[in-house]
């Protein structure tokens, strides 16, 4: 049985940010997750925006923590090398009435402490992003908005936390939580743990986990959002280098168009109330509607560049704000309802929880050997000519320069690096999130068997024990073709 000062349930971006923050102290930290990897829930499937801080209502936890978290990203990027860039953003006004909404956002942002907000004319907005709809009424500009790969950020946090002594247990769904005189007894699968404090950061599963401890005084109301992803290079092709929002609604920030860190374009999400956080389905009719709506912002978007669709669940709480508090069960803390801007806020949430633990008497003594830096990654470089990539894919197995993935041009050396960074990888999706093998136009049809071969030969895994991709490449292509049919696009 492992014992700890703090046990964190949920290895999404909030749980991993907290684990890393606490790893700088002389504490025993356990991090548990039900999945086979970190960041596989809401962290995996969201817009990847580090929000500027003007949308969340001033005076709320969302408003306070989003701006604090936003300003922590530059240093985090220097330390962890996960990929972050301040692009700025525009919220578009399509009709004069939308300018009233933009003015309210500006005033709210200024109350939150956002810097550099400005309402632009249509002409000024088009200078920032020439591919925009020319028939705008104006736009709200925010220079502090940024983009990040959310799952790569989460992986970086987890790797650094592990390097600094955090014990990670994957494939460990929690089944029971028993309050004892000096802490908690926690059981997950065939593993048993004891901890002085327990932090519930289980995302969409927060209410269920809280219920195990008798501390569920809130509900999670899952909301699904579907997305379309365009191929790498599409951001440059569309001359789009910043995040483009439409006027927000009561259900969210509307359909956005944003570049990704790797040069794709991401379109979405919509907002669907669903009964289950397991409802991750997509449908071509909704995806076509999302694309049409996005074209109101950027008319030149080309649906033929779409290579993937996906959906994510926002773990919306029933209180309308983040829930970050000690529960009615002493020593058990709920971090619940962490929907947007949760990714942005996650580093600041970690600091807030640290303060709550200090108030409860947990002793914080800094380690002498804490290392905030993650070793440099071996990553795919700029894309080469397809003919050269095809040639390099023919190199023999074992050659570090052999391309395992032709679309994203991922070499064996990149796979080797990913497998050596402290988190065991046993699925194609886990490798994909770290190396981009499977993220290109063919969606793993070529590289999937090669990645599986590498895992078998280098990790000693059985082929039958390696899960396939979360979505079948052929099904992806069929769905996207149906989207094109609905849009009356020849393909």
Image (spheres, rainbow, N blue to C red):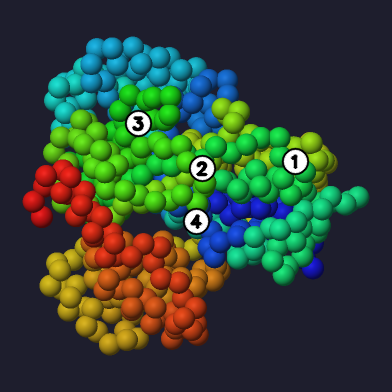
Q: Which residue is mark 4?
A: 40
Question: Relative to 1, is 149 on the left or the right?
Answer: left
Badge 3, how many Cα within 10 Å: few under 14, some, many 20+? Answer: many
> Quadrant of residue 358 in the image?
top right
**Nearer the camera: disc 1 or disc 2:** 2
Mark 2 in CB contact with mark 4 (< 8 angstroms): no
Name which of mark 3 and mark 1 comes first in the sequence. 1
Q: Which residue is mark 1?
A: 215
Which numbered circle lies on residue 275? 2
As helix, strand or loop, the secondary structure at mark 1 comes to loop
Which numbered circle lies on residue 254? 3
Residue at image coords 42%, 30%: 252
Residue at image coords 60%, 60%: 34
Residue at image coords 41%, 37%: 272
Mark 2 in CB contact with mark 3 (< 8 angstroms): no
CA separation in Å, label 2 and label 4: 19 Å
Q: Quadrant of the C terminus?
A: bottom left
In the rendered view, would you say 362 is above or below 34?
above
CA separation in Å, label 4 and label 3: 24 Å
As helix, strand or loop, the secondary structure at mark 2 comes to loop
* Residue 367, image x, y percentages: 71, 55
CA separation in Å, label 4 and label 1: 25 Å
Towards the viewer: 20 or 486: 486
Camera sees residue 38: yes
CA separation in Å, label 1 and label 2: 22 Å
């Amino acid at each position: 049985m492992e014992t700890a000062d703090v046990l964190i349930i949920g290895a999404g971006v909030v749980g991993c940010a907290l684990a890393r923050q606490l790893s700088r102290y002389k504490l025993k930290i356990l991090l548990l997750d039900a999945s086979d990897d970190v960041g596989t829930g809401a962290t995996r499937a969201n817009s990847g925006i580090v929000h500027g801080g003007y949308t969340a209502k001033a005076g709320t936890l969302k408003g306070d923590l989003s701006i604090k978290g936003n300003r922590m990203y530059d240093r985090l990027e220097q330390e962890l090398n996960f990929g972050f860039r301040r692009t700025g953003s525009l919220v578009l006004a399509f009709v004069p009435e939308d300018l009233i909404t933009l003015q309210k956002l500006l005033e709210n942002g200024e109350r939150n402490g956002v810097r550099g907000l400005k309402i632009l004319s249509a002409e000024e907005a088009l200078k920032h992003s020439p591919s925009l709809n020319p028939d705008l009424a104006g736009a709200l500009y925010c220079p502090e908005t940024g983009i990040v790969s959310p799952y790569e950020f989460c992986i970086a946090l987890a790797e650094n936390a592990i390097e600094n002594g955090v014990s990670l247990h994957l494939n460990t769904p929690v089944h029971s939580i028993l309050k004892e005189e000096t802490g908690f007894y926690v059981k997950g699968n065939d593993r048993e743990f004891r901890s002085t404090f327990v932090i519930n950061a289980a995302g969409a599963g927060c209410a269920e986990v809280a219920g195990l401890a008798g501390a569920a005084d809130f509900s999670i109301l899952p909301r699904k959002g579907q997305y379309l992803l365009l191929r790498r290079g599409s951001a440059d092709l569309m001359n789009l280098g910043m995040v483009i929002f439409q006027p927000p609604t009561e259900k969210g920030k509307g359909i956005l168009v944003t570049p990704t860190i790797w040069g794709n374009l991401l379109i979405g999400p919509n907002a669907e109330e669903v009964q289950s956080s397991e409802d991750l389905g997509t449908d071509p009719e909704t995806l076509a509607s999302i694309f049409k709506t996005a074209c109101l912002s950027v008319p030149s978007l080309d649906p033929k560049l779409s290579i993937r669709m996906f959906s994510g669940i926002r773990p919306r709480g029933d209180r309308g704000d983040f829930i970050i508090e000690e529960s009615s069960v002493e020593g058990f803390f709920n971090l619940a309802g962490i929907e947007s801007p949760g990714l942005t806020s996650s580093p600041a949430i970690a600091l807030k929880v640290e303060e709550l633990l200090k108030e409860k008497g947990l002793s914080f003594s800094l380690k002498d050997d804490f290392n905030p830096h993650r070793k440099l990654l071996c990553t795919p470089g700029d894309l080469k000519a397809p003919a050269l990539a095809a040639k390099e894919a023919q190199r023999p197995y074992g050659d570090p320069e052999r391309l395992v993935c032709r679309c994203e041009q991922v070499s064996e050396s990149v796979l080797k690096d990913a497998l050596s960074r402290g988190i065991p990888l046993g699925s194609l999706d886990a490798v994909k999130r770290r190396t981009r093998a499977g993220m290109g136009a063919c969606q793993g049809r070529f590289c999937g068997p090669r990645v599986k071969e590498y895992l078998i030969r280098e990790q000693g895994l059985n082929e039958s024990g390696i899960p396939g991709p979360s979505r079948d490449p052929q099904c992806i292509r069929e769905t996207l073709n149906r989207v094109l049919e609905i849009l009356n696009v020849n393909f």
